[in-house]
Image: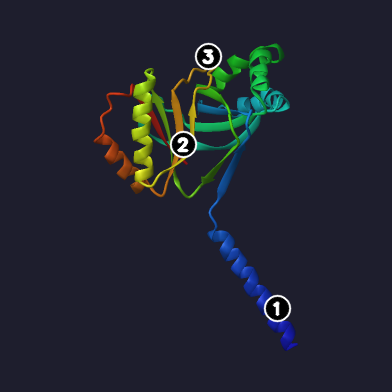
């Protein structure tokens, strides 16, 4: 009897420890991108009172997209805007199996859903999109306890852009930030134009750490960059 009680107590303690450990764990979202896949970034703002239209969209065009290899990925809400005139509410991430499949969807969707673009305009007040062909296997680990920031840089002069990005990325690392992904090039379909030269997602230990980085960057010359958009993510 004593042995049974002792074993029961041991089991109970083990369960409680496991629960405590699980509760203390940080949620990590993982995104795996393979060479040849296409990575979408969508910056969107949903119009109010569009829940029914949104459901119909996902059960119609959304199903067609998935049949053509579209795969939604963990994304972010936009908590605040620190720089720039674009102010979307969400950063949506997704991927496609290949560039040919991604572009086939853009070519063919109107033949299957004639009012496709009109439905999007009816649901979202802003819809900016850019997609990138992935040139090597990579993984993105999103620690949801961290402080995430998306930064988009515009500059037509490649030398000026390279100089500024080097300075910018060094400041991120120096201040304890981590560059989760940095994207260049890419394409933006007609009607959904979003065309920064570089789009980056960074992770920070805290808002204070990011604030320290911002203070450092205020002292840097901005002559070699045309425009910046920056969003605080959650």
Q: Residues within 10 Å of mark 1 (few under 14, many from 20)?
A: few
| Real-space CA distance between mark 2 and mark 1, rounded to the nearest whole angstrom | 48 Å
Locate residue 145, reporting x and y percent: 48, 50
Nearest to the observer: residue 196 or residue 112? 196
- Quadrant housing the N terminus: bottom right
Pointers 2 and 1 in contact (CB under 8 A)? no
Q: Residues within 10 Å of mark 2 (few under 14, many from 20)?
A: many
For this view, does 218 lie left or right of residue 111? left
Q: Secondary structure at mark 3?
A: loop
Using the image, tell me which numbered label, if any, was put on residue 201.
Answer: 2
N-terminal of the pair, mark 2 or mark 1, is 1
Pointers 1 and 3 in contact (CB under 8 A)? no
- Name the residue carrying label 1: 8
- Name the residue carrying label 3: 191
At 59% from the left and 60% from the top, the residue drawn is: 22
N-terminal of the pair, mark 2 or mark 3, is 3
Residue at the limit of the structure toward the left, as seen here? 219
| Residue 212 appears in the rendering | yes
For this view, does 192 lie left or right of residue 172? right
Among the 4 quarters of the image, the one containing residue 114: top right
At 30% from the left and 45% from the top, the residue drawn is: 212
At 51% from the left and 32% from the top, the residue drawn is: 91
Locate residue 232, reporting x and y percent: 41, 38
N-terminal of the pair, mark 1 or mark 3, is 1
For this view, does 116 lie left or right of residue 206? right
Nearest to the observer: residue 64 or residue 53? 64
Locate residue 172, reporting x and y percent: 37, 41
| Real-space CA distance between mark 2 and mark 3, rounded to the nearest whole angstrom | 24 Å
Using the image, tell me which numbered label, if any, was put on residue 16.
Answer: none
How is colour applied across the structure in the image? rainbow
């Amino acid at each position: 009897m004593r042995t049974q009680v002792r074993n029961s107590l041991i089991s109970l303690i083990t369960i409680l420890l496991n629960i405590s450990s699980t509760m203390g764990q940080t949620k990590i979202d993982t995104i795996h991108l393979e060479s040849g896949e296409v990575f979408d970034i969508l910056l969107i703002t949903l119009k109010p009172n569009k829940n029914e239209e949104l459901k119909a969209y996902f059960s119609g065009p959304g199903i067609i997209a998935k049949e053509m290899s579209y795969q939604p990925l963990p994304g972010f809400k936009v908590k605040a805007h620190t720089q720039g005139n674009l102010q979307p509410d969400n950063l949506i991430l997704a991927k496609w199996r290949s560039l040919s499949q991604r572009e086939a969807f853009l070519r063919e969707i109107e033949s299957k859903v004639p009012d496709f673009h009109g439905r999007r305009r009816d649901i979202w007040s802003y819809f900016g999109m850019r997609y990138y062909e992935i040139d090597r296997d990579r993984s993105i680990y999103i620690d949801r306890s961290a402080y995430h920031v998306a930064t988009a840089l515009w500059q037509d002069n490649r030398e000026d852009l390279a100089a500024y990005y080097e300075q910018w990325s060094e400041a991120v690392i120096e201040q304890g930030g981590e560059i989760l992904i940095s994207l260049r090039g890419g394409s933006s379909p007609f009607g959904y134009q979003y065309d920064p030269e570089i789009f980056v997602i960074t992770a920070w230990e805290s808002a204070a750490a990011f604030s320290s980085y911002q203070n450092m960057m205020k002292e840097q010359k901005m002559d070699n960059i045309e425009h910046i958009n920056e969003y605080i993510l959650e």
